[in-house]
Amino acid sequence: MTSRTAMRVGALCFAALVALAGPAMAQSPASPVQTETVSFADADPQATQIARRMYGQEFSHVRAVRVWLEAPSDDPEQLFVELGNDRGCVEGCLQVALFHNEQWLEIFRQPRSERLGLTGVTATGMKSIITDDRLWSWNARNYVPEPSKDGLTRRDANETELALVAEQVSGGFDAGDRSAFGPPEVDVYDVDMNGYLGKIIAVRSPAICGQSTCPVYLVNADDQIFRVLRSLEGEVGLSRRIRDEQAFRGIELLTRNGISIVSSSSGKRLGSVPVQIVRIAGAQ
């Protein structure tokens, strides 16, 4: 590519990005709404007996309730179970979801959450699960964690931010792709980076991401990119529990195996939140 062609591609990319500042991007995607709460206060005796047969040897505390994880049908064989060995299930307890498909399958297992709820049935035919700090969505095979948006509010990019992104993506963004896929989506989140205001800028477009990950830019107070990360679909979040070496909340990135939590300061991996494993209920 000649320098003149490269400049033209960059200019066209910037023009496409500027278009994003208009009304078409004014609305943020709606957050899933919790439609029901799961509570073990009034355990179902029959459901608890079923669960105890599978988990009673490993756990002394077993309480179960019937739920619908899919649209109601004639086969209400879906349970949420609270498991533990502590009296009253105060510490070290688990919450698991069971689905009967010729045999009992455990499709969700997490430490006890004060908040446990369900959304309405999604396009995959299953409800999403809401815990204290996370939304879990069914992808037709597993429950997958979504990056936590706690403390993040999306806004439209301004012209300075659009120009910054255009400079980064123009090299891999040709006019043919733009006409086929339209302009990329740009999400901006203002964040406190330990005393100064920084930004997280996520970019989404098939032309830029392809079948792989999308760029996520960490930007300092001087509008300079100091780190480039990658995330599926440009999904990004902030960890509520994990902080890096500079005490900044870990950056959550979506991967094919779940969520990877990395340091904004060093880029080092701090932890992960894996996709839920489907297993036979009660199998150790």
Image (cartoon, rainbow, N blue to C red):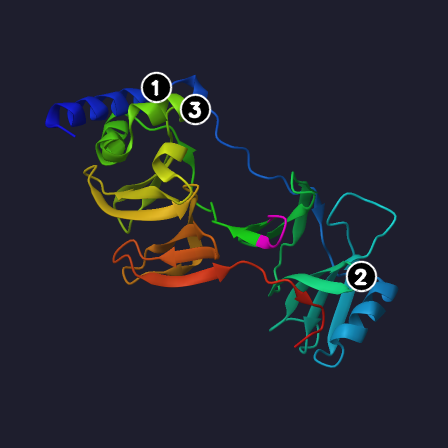
**Label 2 close to label 3 by CB (< 8 Å):** no
Residue at label 3? 25
From what the image shows, is residue 51 above or below residue 202? below
Residue 184 in the image: state x and y as whole percent. Answer: 37, 29
**Three-letter code for the amino acid on which mark 2 is drawn:** Glu
- Badge 3: residue crowd in 10 Å (few <14, some 14–19, many ≥20): some
Please name the residue shown 18% across and 38% down the image: 222
Choose the circle earlier in sequence order: 2 or 3.
Answer: 3
Residue at label 1? 19
From what the image shows, is residue 73 above or below residue 257? above
- Say which quadrant the C terminus sits in: bottom right
Viewer-nearest residue: 39 or 274: 274
Q: Please say whether residue 205 is visible from this viewpoint.
A: no
SS label for mark 3: helix
Residue at label 2? 102
CA gap, disc 1 and disc 2: 52 Å
- Badge 1: residue crowd in 10 Å (few <14, some 14–19, many ≥20): some
Residue 267: image quadrant is bottom left
What residue span does the magenta drawing correspond to? 138-143
Q: Is residue 19 magenta?
A: no
- Say which quadrant the N terminus sits in: top left
From what the image shows, is residue 15 above or below residue 284? above
Residue 48 in the image: state x and y as whole percent. Answer: 82, 67
